[in-house]
């Protein structure tokens, strides 16, 4: 059972299932999932080729026998090739933003929506949300799953929702003040934008009711969390999800904040080497591969998320025995290869935020004017510290360059910028500008 101090951070009893019961439930639901997947031509063909039937699955560990699914598979079967039920049973469609082409469309039955709302309610309650709270949702509403997923999870808890949607920072600040929201939902980078705007507008932070922030949809560091918690005077928790396997609610933090608990009664997660596709040892970084074993409309097997993280097992002090994931370190498809070295933007962010005086706003610009990569890290300096004195700025640049080198092993050019120089983003921040493929040389 959960320890007494944590009983108010648990939404339902299934979160506290013993490990052996979790695995037994996963086995039953995996078999049912395979039966549903047989209605999907993509999976039916794979099953026939691999000799897979529900009866050939004898434990949850047999997930490794099943085919992998990729983003390309979704695009090849656009729009509804992965639909496992008749269209008349579908009550909702969502999808990716489609910024690199057509979106990946995902479908939900009414049962799927009920499960989704409940899983979002779990991580919200685990992060401190209570029914008497008011929550301002600064996520986009539309095809993007974030806004609606959190919205219905909040309502499931019984809290009030302010569906502010993304952007319009002045309106967000007005609502935070006038409506006295207790909690905020948005991306970490947009929370930083709001924190800056509160300071710039001279808003008295003590006059705001904010206590909690539920932040996700992009990687962020522990240092960024500390900055946000200090500037907004909140408790910020991390959560994880992706459209292809459901949306938000796949995992989320408890008060211990030693990793995000996977909702393993509805998902089976693996951590694989992106090259060999073999499981990595516990605690080592690998690509998360997730199966959504309870969805009706679009059950998905072994989806390659491309998100790099670490998995940890063992009973948490909160009472849960589910696997926990670290923060997302980066993406296997967003990993930068600079002069033969694998680098994630989050590593550079970690180095920057460890230096006093740097703001949590940066941009990595890659060029290849001749044969070698040239990399410039553009970083803003906090208000009051940007100086015209060459010696001050040179010293700071050296400190930043050394910190980056210690983490990445690379010597990169550092450009210091005045506050508010770089573009702010309402959704996911764009940290990397890679011009190497458009140089034409």
Image: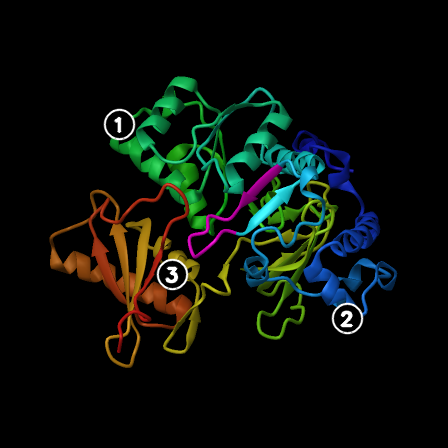
The image quarter containing residue 65 is: bottom right
Q: CA distance from mark 2 to mark 1?
A: 64 Å
**The N terminus appears in which quarter of the rendering?**
top right
Which residue occupies 45% across, 63% down?
A: 334
Disc 1 marks which residue? 202
In the rendered structure, the answer to whether residue 241 lies left or right of residue 99 reads right
Disc 3 marks which residue? 348
User: x, y percentage for residue 269?
Assistant: 68, 56
Q: CA distance from mark 2 to mark 3?
A: 43 Å
**Mark 3 Cα within 10 Å, few/some/many (few <14, many 20+)?**
many
User: x, y percentage for residue 57?
Assistant: 84, 61
2 vs 1, front mark: 2
Whether 308 is among the magenta residues is no
Q: CA distance from mark 1 to mark 3?
A: 31 Å
User: x, y percentage for residue 252?
Assistant: 60, 43
Magenta stretch? 92-103
The image quarter containing residue 339 is: bottom left
Asked whether residue 358 is in view, the answer is yes
Q: Determine which of the numbered discs, if any, sits on residue 50 in the image.
A: 2
Asked if the residues shown at circle 1 and circle 3 are in contact, with their CB atoms under 8 angstroms apart, the answer is: no
In the rendered structure, the answer to whether residue 7 lies left or right of residue 162 reads right
Which badge, 2 or 1, is on the more N-terminal residue? 2
Task: Reply above or below: 430 against 320.
Answer: below
Magenta highlight: main SS? loop
The image quarter containing residue 346 is: bottom left
Which badge, 1 or 3, is on the more N-terminal residue? 1
Asked if the residues shown at circle 2 and circle 3 are in contact, with their CB atoms under 8 angstroms apart, the answer is: no
């Amino acid at each position: 059972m959960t320890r007494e101090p944590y009983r108010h951070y648990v939404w339902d009893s299934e979160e506290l299932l013993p490990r052996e019961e979790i695995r037994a439930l996963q086995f039953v639901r995996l078999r049912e999932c395979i039966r549903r997947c047989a209605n999907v031509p993509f999976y039916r063909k794979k099953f026939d080729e691999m000799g897979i039937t529900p009866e050939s699955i004898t434990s949850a560990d047999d997930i490794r026998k099943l085919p992998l699914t990729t983003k390309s598979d979704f695009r090849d079967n656009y729009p509804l090739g992965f639909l496992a039920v008749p269209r008349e049973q579908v009550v909702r469609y969502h999808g990716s933003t489609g910024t690199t082409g057509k979106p990946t469309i995902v479908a939900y039955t009414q049962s799927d929506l009920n499960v989704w709302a409940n899983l979002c309610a779990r991580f919200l309650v685990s992060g401190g949300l209570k029914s008497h709270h008011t929550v301002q949702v600064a996520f986009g509403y539309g095809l993007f799953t974030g806004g609606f997923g959190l919205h219905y999870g909040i309502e499931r808890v019984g809290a009030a929702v302010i569906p502010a949607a993304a952007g319009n920072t002045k309106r967000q600040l007005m609502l935070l003040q006038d409506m006295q929201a207790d909690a905020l939902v948005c991306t970490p980078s947009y929370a930083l934008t709001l924190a800056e705007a509160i300071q710039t507008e001279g808003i008295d932070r003590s006059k705001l009711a904010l206590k909690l922030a539920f932040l996700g949809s992009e990687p962020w560091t522990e240092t960024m969390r500390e900055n946000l918690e200090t500037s907004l005077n909140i408790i910020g928790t991390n959560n994880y999800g992706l459209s292809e396997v459901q949306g938000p609610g796949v995992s989320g933090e408890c008060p211990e904040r030693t990793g995000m608990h996977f909702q393993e009664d509805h998902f089976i997660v693996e951590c694989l080497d992106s090259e060999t596709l073999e499981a990595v040892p516990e605690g080592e970084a690998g690509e998360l591969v997730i199966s959504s074993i309870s969805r009706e409309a679009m059950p998905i097997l072994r989806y390659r998320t491309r998100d790099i993280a670490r998995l940890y097992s063992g009973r948490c002090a909160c009472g849960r025995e589910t696997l926990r994931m670290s923060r997302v370190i980066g993406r296997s498809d967003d990993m930068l290869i600079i002069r033969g070295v694998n680098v994630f933007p989050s590593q550079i962010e970690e180095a920057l935020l460890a230096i006093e005086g740097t703001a949590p706003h940066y941009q990595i610009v890659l060029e290849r004017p001749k044969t070698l990569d040239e990399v410039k890290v553009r970083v803003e300096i906090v208000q009051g510290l940007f100086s015209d004195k060459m010696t001050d700025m040179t010293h700071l640049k050296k400190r930043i360059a050394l910190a980056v080198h210690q983490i990445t092993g690379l010597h990169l050019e550092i450009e210091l910028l005045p506050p508010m120089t770089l573009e702010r983003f309402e959704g996911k921040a764009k940290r990397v500008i890679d011009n190497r493929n458009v140089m034409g040389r």
